[in-house]
Structures are given as structure tokens and as C-alpha cells.
């Protein structure tokens, strides 16, 4: 009696994944299912709904929520409100000597009026993070300048922001990030052009 060998079938199953990888895949499926369910619910109410547009809006809202939560945690740890951080970061972005007129900061770096900026600056000054200095060419005007303590806190907080953002987007390759930026740039232009 001759023995017949069973032909070997190539293994088409992927190699076992780590528990962390399995959890990540499971979470991705859960998030996709949640967006699909949301779109389906809207579709039952509005039959002519563009599913892709609704799904994009839902994902952007979720991304915004997650980014805001991560940055809020950074601000809380730094003891800063959003506008306080914007003022410190705005002065950092202006560059050394980290000094500007309140009118230059209001609106561009901090979404408040110059009157609203006065109270904000007063709180940061009381904490020793900024100081008011006379304008070199106009003694009637005051400038806002970061103190060494303000510079140190701004640098730490900016580094923590960067770390939080990179952590949230760590699953994207460099090529993914470039494609994502290109699509988001196009989307932003489309949205801005559609606004009245």
C-alpha cells in the first residue's frame, strides 16, 4: 500500500497579532460602525442625504472632540485657560524679545477684543508670566512682554501640545500625513468658499 502525502496548502491567515494590535483593529471597527450607524440613521430621515459628506462631517467632529480633549488636558496641567495659552504662545510666535502691543495680539493671536485682552493680561501679570513695558517710541502706549517664567511655561506647554498631537496622530505614516493635509487643505478651501 502506497502512502499518499497530502499536498501542502499555503497558509493564507495573517500571523498572530499582539493584543494591542487586536485592540486597535477592534476599536477602528467600532468607530467605523458608529459612523456608519449615524449615517444610516440620518439616511432614514433624509433619503437624499450624501452619505460621504455626512460621514466626513461626523469624523471631523470626532477628531475635533479628541484634539480639544487632549489639548484641554495639557492646559489644565499647565494651569492655563485656552486664551491665556494663546496669549503666551502668540508672544512666543512673534519671537524675541517676546513683546507686542495688545492691539497686535487681540484678534490675531487671541480671539478677544483689545478690552478683553486687558483682563487676560492682568491675570497673567499677577502670576508673573508677563509684564507691561513702555513703548520705546510712544510713552502713552504699553507693550506686553513675556517674563522668563512666562517663556518657560509657554515652552513647556507648547512641547506638551506637540507631544499630545503627535501621539494622537502616531498611527499615520509620513505619506498618510501628507495626503491627509492635502485633502484637508482642499476641504478647508471648499468650506471657506461656500461661506457667505
Image (cartoon, grey):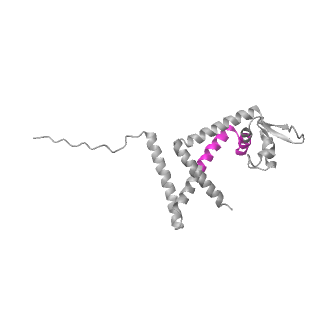
Question: Is 159 within the magenta?
Answer: no
Q: Quadrant of residue 82?
A: top right
Q: Nearer the viewer, residue 180 or 146?
A: 180
Q: Nearer the viewer, residue 78 or 138?
A: 138
Q: Residue at left 47%, top 44%?
A: 24
- In the image, is residue 70 part of the stretch drawn in magenta? yes
Query: Which one is in front, 21 or 175?
Result: 175
Q: Percent position (x, y) of residue 70?
A: 61, 43
Dominant secondary structure of the magenta stretch? helix
Query: Relative to residue 80, is residue 167 drawn left or right?
Result: left
Quadrant including the N terminus: top left
Residue at 68% from the left image edge and 38% from the top image edge = 78
- Residue located at (45% from left, 47% from top): 26
Relative to 28, 146 lies left or right: right
Residue 116 x %, y %: 79, 48
Q: Position of residue 146 (x, y in %)?
A: 77, 36
Q: Taking the image as drawn, is residue 62 in sight?
A: no
Residue at the top extreme of this rendering: 148
- Magenta segment boundaries in residue numbering: 64-89
User: Residue farthest to the right?
Assistant: 140
Q: Is residue 112 visible?
A: yes
Amino acid at each position: 500500500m502506497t502512502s499518499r502525502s497530502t499536498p501542502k496548502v499555503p497558509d493564507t491567515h495573517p500571523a498572530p497579532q499582539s493584543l494591542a494590535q487586536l485592540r486597535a483593529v477592534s476599536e477602528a471597527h467600532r468607530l467605523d460602525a458608529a459612523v456608519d450607524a449615524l449615517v444610516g440613521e440620518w439616511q432614514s430621515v433624509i433619503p437624499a442625504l450624501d452619505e460621504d459628506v455626512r460621514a466626513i462631517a461626523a469624523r471631523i467632529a470626532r477628531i475635533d472632540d479628541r484634539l480639544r480633549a487632549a489639548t484641554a488636558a495639557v492646559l489644565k496641567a499647565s494651569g492655563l485657560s485656552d486664551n491665556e495659552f494663546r496669549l503666551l504662545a502668540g508672544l512666543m510666535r512673534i519671537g524675541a524679545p517676546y513683546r507686542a502691543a495688545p492691539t497686535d495680539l487681540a484678534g490675531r493671536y487671541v480671539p478677544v477684543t483689545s478690552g478683553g485682552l486687558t483682563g487676560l493680561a492682568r491675570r497673567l501679570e499677577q502670576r508673573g508670566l508677563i509684564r507691561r513695558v513702555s513703548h520705546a517710541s510712544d510713552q502713552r502706549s504699553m507693550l506686553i512682554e513675556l517674563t522668563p517664567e512666562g517663556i518657560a511655561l509657554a515652552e513647556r506647554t507648547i512641547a506638551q501640545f506637540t507631544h499630545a498631537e503627535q501621539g494622537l496622530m502616531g498611527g499615520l505614516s509620513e505619506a498618510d500625513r501628507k495626503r491627509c493635509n492635502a485633502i484637508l487643505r482642499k476641504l478647508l478651501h471648499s468650506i471657506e468658499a461656500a461661506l457667505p
